[in-house]
Image: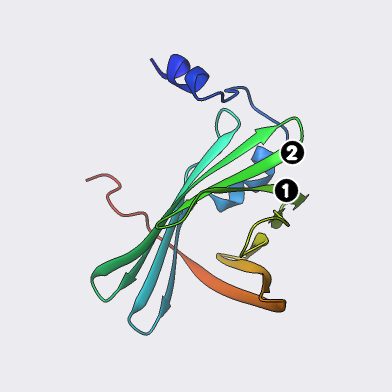
Amino acid sequence: MVVAAGAGLGLSLREGPGIDRVGWLAGCWEARSGSRTIEEQWSAPRGGTMLGTSRTLRSDTTVGWEMVLLRADSAGLAYEAHPSGQSGATFRSTEVSDSLVVFANPQHDFPQKVSYRRRADSLLARIEGTVNGRARAVDFPYARVACPGRGQ
């Protein structure tokens, strides 16, 4: 039963503050650069959560993936990232609007900040922070794409 499973994970299944404000993330996004393709997909906001998945391909080989639980609670939004080959980390929202969401975790190694900015029918994701005392930022410009497997 879904409610029991959610309760076992310690999740609140009630709608929390702010999750609808980032509903613009929902859908499928793609970034291409040379032989590298990054696919990112977000579920619609429901029950105070959104689920995100990402995979990075080089040619036809998956070289990385990430699963994200975006959840609302009384303190705002939490971005719980679970990337391939790394320990999970939680980032807390510092800014939430109808076109920008920023999450931060100053104790994390890299990145310390994750953001998404809506631009017409595209999305700019950005990770940033410090590595060995030097500032570093990486942008991921995504275009909206049709979600694979819909209606099949």
Residue 40 can be seen in this image? yes
State the image coordinates of residue 55 (x, y, percent, origin top left): 38, 60
Q: Does label 1 or label 2 sit earlier along the sequence?
A: 2
**Is residue 54 in view from this perspective?**
no
Amino acid type of disc 2?
Gly
Q: Position of residue 145 (x, y in %)?
A: 41, 62
Label 2's element? Answer: strand
**Residue drawn at the location 32% of the way across and 81% of the way down:** 35
| x and y percentages locating residue 85 in the rendered image | 40, 58
Q: Position of residue 49 (x, y in %)?
A: 56, 35
Q: Closest to the observer: 108 or 149? A: 108
Q: Look at the numbered discs 1 and 2 and tell me whether their residues touch, using CB distance below 8 Å.
A: yes
Q: Is residue 63 above or below residue 27?
A: below
Residue that label 2 marks: 76
Residue under label 1: 93
Residue pictured at 73% horizontal, 57% vertical? 106
Colour scheme in the image? rainbow
Q: Residue at left 66%, top 61%?
A: 115
Residue 8 is tagged as none
Q: Nearer the viewer, residue 80 or 27?
A: 80
User: Considering the image in quadrants, where does the N terminus appear?
Assistant: top left
| Distance in Å between CA atoms under marks 1 and 2 | 6 Å
